[in-house]
Image (cartoon, rainbow, N blue to C red):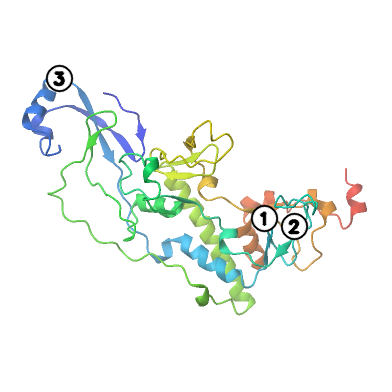
Amino acid sequence: MDFPSKLGTLQISSKSEFLNPQLFTSLLHPLFSQKSILKLSLKPRRVSQLVVRSENHPPQNSDFPKITLINNLKKLLKVVPVHACRFCNEIHVGPVGHPFKSCKGPDSGSRKGVHDWLMNATVDDIFLPVEAFHLFDRLGKRIPHEERFAIPRIPAVVELCIQTGVEIPEYPTKRRRKPIIRIAKSEFVDADESELPKPEGPRGTVLAELDDSEIVAPCNEEERILLAEETLQAWEQMRKGAKRLMKMYLVRVCGYCPEIHVGPSGHKAQNCGAFKHQQRNGQHGWQAALLDDLIPPRYVWHVPHVNGPPLQRELRSFYGQAPAVVEMCVQAGAAVPDEYRPTMRLDVGIPSNVREAEMVV
């Protein structure tokens, strides 16, 4: 039987052997008797070994940038003003909210789309939380609709790290250290690991999030700049690390809604509420996810001069945008990364007034 070249975390070995009872007796499940093995060996069926990808060691505190990013964002919120609209989910990083009429919240028509800015933005407004179901066995059966409330939901990035090899006692998962034996298209048995030594315990502990009472703002400008650079480095490290992991461990996203599932195939929970979900009975349309689906960058308007005049509604076409995390770090004193310079439109000259903008060809 031929298998696809890639199935979740499994890879086909280049070596193929004919089924032999003496070769596979020690690997097969105890439920398989010698008689059943002998019947299979009489048929020259070709079986390919599916090799479980080796697991990474749990990261140290400094190697878990997500927690570092969240803790640093809490500190930056004390020195960098971030506004949130009272009626919609839009935010703005800067001393004054932008004047653009883009509000789509309640009674936006009577307000002509003007935002009502408040200084109550939180970390969840800047770094959007994306959750996914935690899988005890990523190769097990798909989550049915009836069990959707019995299975915990955790941040999707954390679930991806757990399936990679991070050990978190609150969310146990099944680990395999030997190749599995596939006996049918959707059936397999685990190899016997009794002769293997016991696995080592977790190395180091995962850094915990700081409580709001423990947050201390930077004292001077030098500490603020160092904090901004560290936050920007954690943001880039998290995105680059997640992108590398997504090449080895499959992540699914619904084509209709932003639901994320970390695993070879999506779950069966019928909780999709996107357009025409009644025709699909709430079922998701799973497809391969991108990095922005797992870690969505919350784009905000870039303020060219923080201490200068505020943004003008008539000059909207001259302003650029950047992820909220990047914009906060830039306003705190960090250097602008090269990959965000085009979207922030730093090479575009901004007119000083509306009359000068009308003269631009």
Q: Quadrant of residue 336?
A: bottom right
Residue at position x 10%, y 23% from top? 39
Q: Is the residue under label 3 in contact with that under label 2 (CB below 8 Å)?
A: no
* Mark closer to the chain start, 1 or 2: 1
Q: Position of residue 105 (x, y in %)?
A: 70, 52
Nearer to me, 253 or 110: 110
Q: Quadrant of residue 49?
A: top left
* Mark closer to the chain start, 1 or 3: 3
Between circles 1 and 3, the one closer to the viewer is 1
Nearer to me, 26 or 343: 26
| Distance of label 2 from label 3 (alpha carbons) | 72 Å
- Disc 3 designates what residue? 43
Q: Is the residue under label 2 in contact with that under label 1 (CB below 8 Å)?
A: yes
Q: Residue furthest bottom?
A: 219
- Disc 2 designates what residue? 115
Q: Secondary structure at mark 1?
A: loop
- Disc 1 designates what residue? 90
Nearer to me, 126 or 7: 126
In the image, what residue type sits under mark 1?
Answer: Glu
